[in-house]
Amino acid sequence: MQANRHVAQAEQEMALLYRKYAPGLLTYVRMRITSEEDVEDLVVEVFMAAIENAKFAVLAEKEKQLWLWRVTRNKVIDTYRRAKTHQNVTLEHVADGLFADEMASPEYAALRQEDYMDLYGLLQSLPPLQQQILRMRFGQDLSCREIATALGKQENVVRVTLSRSLNLLRKIYRRRREEQERG
């Protein structure tokens, strides 16, 4: 009975430490590792190491905090080391087929980004209701009925506004393309 109480108390203490320090540790690791899954796994590994370390339980809270940060830093370094040793494929081996799909090329990505910026500028020039309807339809993937309910409008008003907005954007794009072809 005493052992169960001790285990429960240790679990509660670890849960408190996790709630208190995990957000900061996650932020630290996110700034250094790009994969969100790897970030979360690494922080879980830190707390698992704390649970498995018999001496951790007897440390003062400040010492526990320092221990968690030190282990996190070391695990990030280990991750870099592992990644460095796994990078044994040379660019020559993959360069030929790297951008076989033209849509994956850096040039295409840059052009697509430029198009997105143009579209964003055009959207900003639309009236607020049209912007909101477009955002809800294509950004949030809501149906016209759902948009009408959310905005307190009739569904046919939403459909007409959406159609007019899209036609206006098409007209502006055509005009710009024609100007670019002439100039």
Image (cartoon, grey):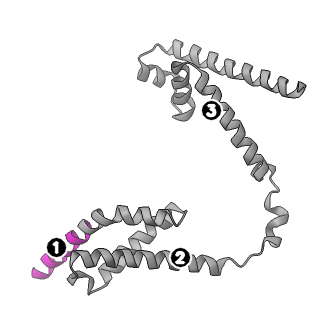
Tell me if residue 24 is in the magenta stretch: no
**Magenta stretch, residue numbers:** 2-15
Residue under label 3 = 120
The image's mark for residue 93 is none
Which residue is painted at 68% across and 18% down in the image? 168
Total numbered labels: 3
Q: Mark 1 or 3, which is nearer the eye?
A: 3
Q: Main secondary structure of the magenta part?
A: helix
- Hey, which residue is sitting farthest front in the picture? 183
Would you say 154 lies left or right of 18 here? right
- Hey, which residue is sitting farthest left in the picture? 2
| Residue 78 place in picture, x, y as percent | 51, 80
Location of the C terminus by quadrant is top right
In front here: 49 or 31? Answer: 31
Residue type beneath disc 3: Tyr
Residue under label 2 = 79
Residue under label 1 = 9
Which residue is painted at 44% across and 75% down in the image? 73
In front here: 151 or 65? Answer: 65
Label 3 SS: helix
Label 2 SS: helix
Mark earlier in primary sequence (2, 1): 1
**Quadrant of the rendered structure where residue 64 is?**
bottom left
How far separated are the C-alphas under marks 1 and 3?
54 Å
Residue type beneath disc 2: Thr
Mark earlier in primary sequence (1, 3): 1
Mark earlier in primary sequence (3, 2): 2
How far separated are the C-alphas under marks 2 and 1?
32 Å
- In the image, residue 158 sits, relative to residue 73, either above or below, namely above
Which residue is painted at 65% across and 78% down in the image? 86
Tell me if residue 4 is in the magenta stretch: yes
